[in-house]
Amino acid sequence: MVDNRSATALVIACVLSALATVYLSVAVGTRHWYQYTSPQVRHEHNATELRALHQELGDGELDEKTASDAMFRLNGTLGLWWRCVRVPADRNRWYREPGGGAWRALLLNPNPEMDTECVSFTLSQQFTPKYTEPGNHNSGEDIIRTYMWRCQFLLPLLSLGLVLVGGLVGFCACLCRSFSPTLGIGLLHLLAGVCSLGCVCCFLAGMDLLHRVSVIPDQVDGSLGWSLYLALISSPLYMMAAALLVWAARSHSKNYYRFTAYRVA
């Protein structure tokens, strides 16, 4: 028999856990963790460089320096599994028109219609080592950045996995009408909250280290995106759910022992 307070705590914990799982899942699947704002194209040489960066990014297999340069110069957005750039919707804007020799759309129209192009990270790319000098394989592996990058995409998966296990255990406990696993489910949610918070910390630390070893062009600004904030919000939600589950388990245990002692007496 579950008292009303414990039952209410369980319901609120389930709602918090569901919200946190949705937030974290959306954050993992979207690309707006970090975004760059690049200056407009002002002359032909600049447009030529941007076209070359766009073509290299589309090739897929490219080193970290080239990918970072494309992100810096093409209003890039970065996610755990995606990197995207903004390019003119009309591909002819990147090329000279026959006989004209003018970069008409980019140079004469300062605000052309833009499209977003995204390239996903493969699993092998996620485990590719980072180097002390991005793009220079002879500079030696940067151990800290390498493991920061790996943790930032492994930790949210671990967090979601822990919550999934907790949900399955809770479902089985409901079928068996047992309150005993509640404490364990609360601990799983606590670990999930720590993992989601660790993911955000690893991402921020990794971006800071990348910016320290990269040459960022003038007038390029970076800012945090809404996907990162969703992942950050999921952490306290998991921890609050964990606190409620642990409290409900302890409260039910105390009431159970009191009821048992009363019956024995």
Image (cartoon, grey):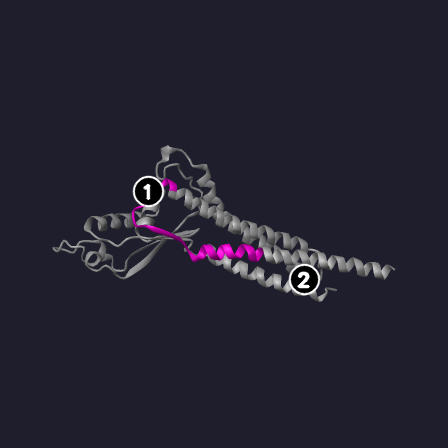
Quarter of the image for residue 108 reads bottom left
In depth, the one of 51 and 196 nearer the eye is 196
Element carrying mark 2: helix
Q: Residue at x 77, y 59 (%)?
A: 256
The reply to whether residue 11 is in sight is yes
Q: Quadrant of residue 125?
A: top left
Q: Residue at x 14, y 53 (%)?
A: 101
Residue 198: say if magenta.
no
Q: Which residue is mark 1?
A: 215
Image quadrant where residue 18 sits: bottom right
Q: What residue span does the magenta drawing correspond to?
A: 212-238
- Asked whether residue 125 is in view, the answer is no
Crowd around label 2: few <14 · some 14–19 · many ≥20 (10 Å): few
Single out the mark in the foreground, 2 or 1.
1
Q: Which residue is mark 2?
A: 174
Disc on the earlier residue, 2 or 1: 2
Neighbour tally class for label 1: few under 14, some 14-19, many 20 plus, Cα within 10 Å = few
